[in-house]
Amino acid sequence: MDQNTLKIQLQKAGVEYLLVQFVDLNGSAKVKMVPRDMLDVVADTGAGFAGGAVWGMGQNAADHDMMARIDLASYTPAPWAPGLARFAADLYVDNQPFAYCPRVHLKRALAELRAAGYVFNVGVEPEHFLVTRTAEGTIVPWDPAHVDTLVKPCYDFKGLSAAYDYLRDLSEALQKLGWGVYQADHEDANGQYEINFRYADALTTADRFIFFKMLAHETARKYGATVTFMPKPFADRTGSGAHLHYHLADAETGRNLFAADHDARGLGLSELAYHFLGGVLAHARALCAVTSPTVNCYKRLQVGAGLTGPRSGFTWTPAFITYGDNNRTQMIRTPGPGHVEDRTVSSAFNPYLAFAAYSAAGLDGIRRGLDPGEPNRENAYALGLEEMARRKVRLLPQSLSEALDEFERDDVVRASLGPIAAEFLRLKRAEWQEYHRQVTDWEVERYLTLF
């Protein structure tokens, strides 16, 4: 769509203001609001931002402005505010694409895939919680009807019904945007929900995931709730993931290249798919730093439920680097022919960085002809550490620090983030150190009078 056509469309839609939006290293949406008649300026020159005011941009107060140039194809009316539309933007500095911009970086990674003849199609499951704060400042699951109290609340009618207005508003808004919503459900924790929409190419899906979070925040606010994509807000409840469903498609025809009519392993996957999975599994421990990039993510990825595990009895999260059939205890699940799902990915991930790293790992597997071995069809939760060690099955990192060590050692995954890698490591190491300087309630309760 050209700018003149878009101007007519904006006028017909009653759009008066534009949100020029990019993301920082954390994947948090950053915006400026500009009048509609500034469309040409923000498309051709951009809206100016001070990079030193934003996490992970590699700038300080003396650096030249980051200019956010909108992608016309990302036009998205804001359902929560009539007259407002969002445009995803790429950052430029001194008229050059800015290497620290996560969106710019993903576009470069996808161009490398396209040069090899592939398009990376991705779908995301955006699990999230609705919470409220108590008078004491703690958080509790949002439950105004006082019905979302089951130990196993997944799919519960009463829990979903109580959140019907929230889920309906979200679903209807996404349907009007043409995203192809196909289901919404109450997840495995109290106050936890998910809305699923159709997959798209990786760049479109990344843009949509960011907008979904913006829309969910604004919709929840109408109902007195705070939406959180924090992976593990409650120690005794299942955490939130952003499971990736994906395949490579032919860049010319769009044909799913992961699908195969004849697969000796019985999963309906092609040789190309197995090589891609071979790369993902080979680099899984380093990828974890990018797909689970916070301290809190590793409260979700712990081995087993433990003594204070989820009330429902299951973590629904893998701990070992495996793949299998339609089996949710594996890192990579195969729900159907030509369709794979990575269940490790955290709801706190930055989709632009994660998709860039993921595609690089898979492409490395294709180039090297890596084979992932035979699928694991067993219940990985029941096998335990000793048995997995005997089988030489590797464990996912159990802390952010461990994942960062793997990221730093892995040439492919580290290089996949370009200059962002050094900034990512610096900020994430600092996050880990700050976390370990805290004195928690658990420590006070356990140690205050122990000695």
Image (cartoon, helix red, strand yellow):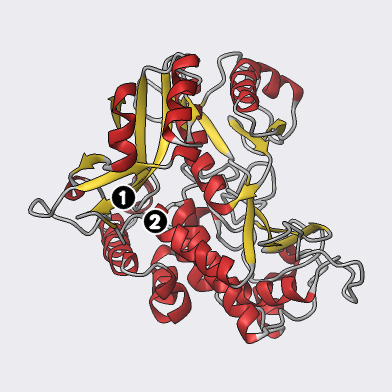
Q: Where is residue 34 in the image (x, y as percent from the top left)?
A: 28, 26
User: Toward the viewer: 135 or 273?
Assistant: 273
Q: Where is residue 43 in the image (x, y as percent from the top left)?
A: 34, 39
Element assignment for label 2: helix
Amino acid type shown at disc 1: Leu
Q: Residues within 10 Å of mark 2 (few under 14, many from 20)?
A: some
User: How many numbered marks have been drawn onto this rendered protein structure?
Assistant: 2
Amino acid type shown at disc 2: Val
Q: From this viewpoint, is residue 140 visible?
A: no
Horizontally, residue 262 falls left or right of residue 227, namely right
Vertical arrangement, residue 114 with respect to residue 160, above or below:
below
Q: How crowded is mark 1: few (under 14 residues within 10 Å), some or many (20 or more)?
A: many
Residue assigned mark 2: 104
Q: Which residue sits at x=59%, y=40%?
A: 127
Horizontally, residue 210 falls left or right of residue 343, namely left
Distance from disc 1 to disc 2, alpha carbons, whole Å, reads 7 Å
Vertical arrangement, residue 223 with respect to residue 140, above or below:
above
Taking the view exactly as shown, the residue that stands out farthest to the front is 4
Q: What quarter of the picture does the C terminus occupy? A: bottom left
Of callouts 1 and 2, the N-terminal one: 1
Based on the displayed image, in which of its 4 quarters is residue 196 positioned?
top right
Q: Position of residue 432 (x, y in %)?
A: 32, 61
Q: Which residue sits at x=43%, y=71%?
A: 402
Residue assigned mark 1: 91
Vertical arrangement, residue 418 with respect to residue 166, above or below:
below
Pointers 1 and 2 in contact (C-beta within 8 Å): yes
Q: From this viewpoint, is residue 264 visible?
A: yes
Q: Which mark is residue 272?
A: none
Q: Which residue sits at x=65%, y=81%?
A: 389
